[in-house]
Amino acid sequence: MRLLYLSDADVRAVGLPMAEILRALEAAFREKGEGRTEVPPKAAIHPAPEALLHAMPAWLPAQRAAGVKWVAAFPGNRSRRLPAVSGLIVLNDAETGLPVAVMDARWITAQRTGAATALAAKFLARPESGMVGLLGCGVQARSNLEALREVFSITGVRAFDRHPERAEALASEMRESSGVDAAAVAEPRSAVAGLDIVVTAGAISRRPHGTIQPGWLAEGAFASLVDFDSFWSREALREVDKFCTDDSEQLARFQEMGFFQGIPSVHADLGELAAGRKPGREVARERTVACNLGLALGDMASAALVYRRAVERGLGSWLPL
């Protein structure tokens, strides 16, 4: 009758490697593709313009992981010097339903989002992909790049942000930490055209600003839409040969709310790709896209690993129920 509280510092101190998160997500999405998970669509409220709060439950029988994430995305927090994304994960015992852990969700949200991009890219990008474009250079850009480097031999990065200093900071980090040919670019097109993998990771908007235009995404390229379709014009998306998502039902729910108007039809969800029920990339010249909306499946798979390691290492604070 007690639960373990893990602060953001505790979660980070666990030191869960990205490679392990990737393996956990691939196994979880394979289970989803076989129909053995329970991941209902998010319940959402929107207390302020461009802000949201989501309740995200999931049950993963194979991992014995059950719980819910309560996550907030408030872009305006940046001007207050507060995190734009915050939240808590509650992990429950699969036999009794009792809560066994409450943990900060920020690090897990970032890492599983990056892992979902890399997992989609495993099925949808060309195996030899090496040049990556990043539009939006915050936390998600870094976690996506970290995960992509687990799957591909990344040789170069082109980074764009409407705040140029953020793009330069990310490029500098990459050059110093890994020696990758990384550069900040002044125009968004330079972070898209001619590149193998493109990640858009700006603020989510109900009305896309349509910065990316037709003809920018090269034949054979893969794009991950971390910020929904905010960066993309309808004409650019219509050039895509395969449009995928992590959950078709959830995408349809967002369309009812006014998001994703005029997008291409969904070729497959990530579970179907992981389980081999739908093909990923079939020819080199295909333009492919993954619009992963963020599933609690990834949060619970990661949180269960974090919890077990935290207990083993004596991290966190035990609280009575």
Image (cartoon, rainbow, N blue to C red):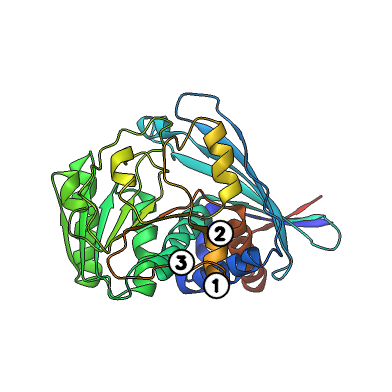
78 over 156 or under it: above or below = above
Q: Residues within 10 Å of mark 2 (few under 14, many from 20)?
A: some
Q: Which residue is mark 1?
A: 276
- In the rendered view, tell whether residue 311 sits above or below residue 88: below
Residue 175, by quadrant, is bottom left
Q: Earlier in the sequence, mark 1 or mark 2?
A: 2
**Residue 151 appears in which quarter of the rendering?**
bottom left
- With 189 as the anchor, is 253 left or right in this view? right
Image disc number at residue 119:
3
Measured from the top left, where is residue 301 in percent x and y?
Answer: 62, 64
Q: Would you call the spot at circle 1 few (<14 residues within 10 Å), some (14-19), or many (20 or more)?
A: some
| Left or right: where 38 falls relative to 75 | right
* N-terminal label among 1 and 3: 3
Q: Secondary structure at mark 3?
A: helix
Q: Position of residue 80 (x, y in %)?
A: 39, 30
State which mark lies toward you, 1 or 3: 1
> Does residue 16 appear in this view?
no
Nearest the camera: 207 or 184?
207
Task: Please determine whether, in this image, residue 44 is positioned above or below residue 144.
Answer: above
How far apart marks 3 and 2 lie (CA) works out to 26 Å
Q: Say which amino acid is labelled 3.
A: Leu
